[in-house]
Amino acid sequence: MSNIELICTYCHRVEVPNSKSLLCPSCRQVLIIKYPYQLIKERIDKKSFELGKGGIWKYFELLPIFDKSNIVSLGEGGTFLHRCKRLSDELKIKQILLKNETTNPTGAFTDRGVSVAISKAKEFGFYSVCCGTTGNIGASLAAYAAKAGLDCTIFIPSTVDLGKLYQMIAYGSKVEPAKDYDEARIKAERFAGSSFLIDPNNPYFLEGIKTTGYEICEQLGWRVPDKIIVPMGSGGHISMIWKAIKELFELGFLKDFNVELIGVQFEEAAPIATSFLNGKDYVEGTNRISKFLGDIGIKEPSLGSLAIRTLKESGGTAVILSYKEILEAMSLLAKTEGVFAEPAAASTIAGVKKLIERGSIDKDEEIVCVITGSGLKDPITARSFVGKVKSVDAIIRKMEEHKFTIKLGLTKMRILSLIHDSELHGYKIWKELSKRFNVNIKIPSVYQHLSELERAGLITRTHTERVLGKPSRWYYSLTAKGKRVLDTWKG
Ligand SMILES: [Zn+2]
């Protein structure tokens, strides 16, 4: 849709779309896109959406891309809205529904936003994109940049979830380390210029993630539920779902928008929820960041004040949760509904539970929980469940040893197999490597491998042998760990 304007969320300055204005030029606050709703109303109706193919692009008239040929899509959106009988029974409530965003192309709702923002990068004529991220948005960006053939540079803090990091690397983006999220964000802002910055504040990204709100209403037959529960990191998703609902009302697609938006945060870093619960209109930053849950543990959420406005306007509230509550919800959700959510996503279920306990949810209400991302993105948290199952723990340990052997490399595995046959010294190992495996490396390299294997606890020195006129030679043998690693390698 063309004829759009960007409005500053703070000073209300109006901008026309251009490749430079991603934040307000006056006050550096977030810009939100406004459409000519009267004009759009004449062009579309509910039927045109219902007949459209699945995914976010059926709402093209309400997205900020001018030319359809610029669309970069991997099939994002159109995710299921599950009715949860078993989970509802478990929580003794009439109706919980899940908006299951784990089935997006990279496993998270951020695909919606990145699809739109990358399409806009193409429309503006950029050849490269960048961002500073705690995770999901980076994984999405890497995938869509690959699809669009754009260069991609991502700055990441050390708290990034491993699964997301693997995705970024696999999709071929350049990954640059940063101390924390703030440094990652600043580095990305400095890098931007000839590269299009796609972060949680990018107005085109925000337009993409609002489609979660369109779909919930459409899937309910063009009406709103009683409550929608959303994890809050930067505060963008919840704010944009609210924007989507108000837009549908303005377009005449909804009779009312009586829905409470409820935001959940993790107690380690909950600046939006804390500020809201303290009656503030703006977010007071926190010095604490989450070591566990990067995506919802942001110190200074850029859309926090907009999120607080959303909670207030919709008559909703915020809930702060402990790590234990979130982990229990992850397990409950997976076991009752077959949906494996990442901790940030499962926090919505923990939020429902807490609100029921407090008597803040009526048992007859219809609640939609937005499950923002897949549990596979955070293998370390996922691993914590396995520890409780003894038989599985053994399998996982074996797999981890197998992974370890891949990391060790072939030469080291060959050295282990030589030492396994008999105790050997470095010079003999060097000769045998050449003779038996045709591995011709220099002697110092052999000693380098031996010292690394020794440090990894896979081999140990047994005794020395004196050779006339030369320094004495150390003999090496396998440790129990070395033998296990070798056995795993041999299968
Ligand atoms: Zn402004």
Image (cartoon, grey):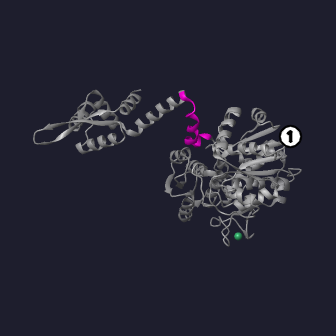
x and y, in percent, of residue 54 in the image: 73, 42
Q: Is residue 3 above or below residue 264?
A: below
Q: Is residue 52 visible?
A: no
Q: Residue at x 39, y 32 (%)?
A: 485
Q: Amino acid at mark 1?
A: Asp
Quick check: 63 left or right of 120? right
Q: Nearer the viewer, residue 105 or 360?
A: 360
Q: Which residues are magenta?
A: 375-390
Q: Helix, strand, or loop for circle 1?
A: loop
Q: Is residue 413 magenta?
A: no
Report the side of 167 relative to 344 (left or right).
left
Question: Residue visible at 53% across and 55% down?
Answer: 157
Viewer-proximal residue, 139 or 302? 302
Query: Does residue 202 appear anywhere in the picture?
Result: yes
Relative height, residue 472 to residue 437 (above, below) = below
- Ligand 1 is found in which quarter of the picture? bottom right
- Taking depth in this image into account, of 17 and 312 the one nearest to the observer is 312
Residue corresponding to mark 1: 364
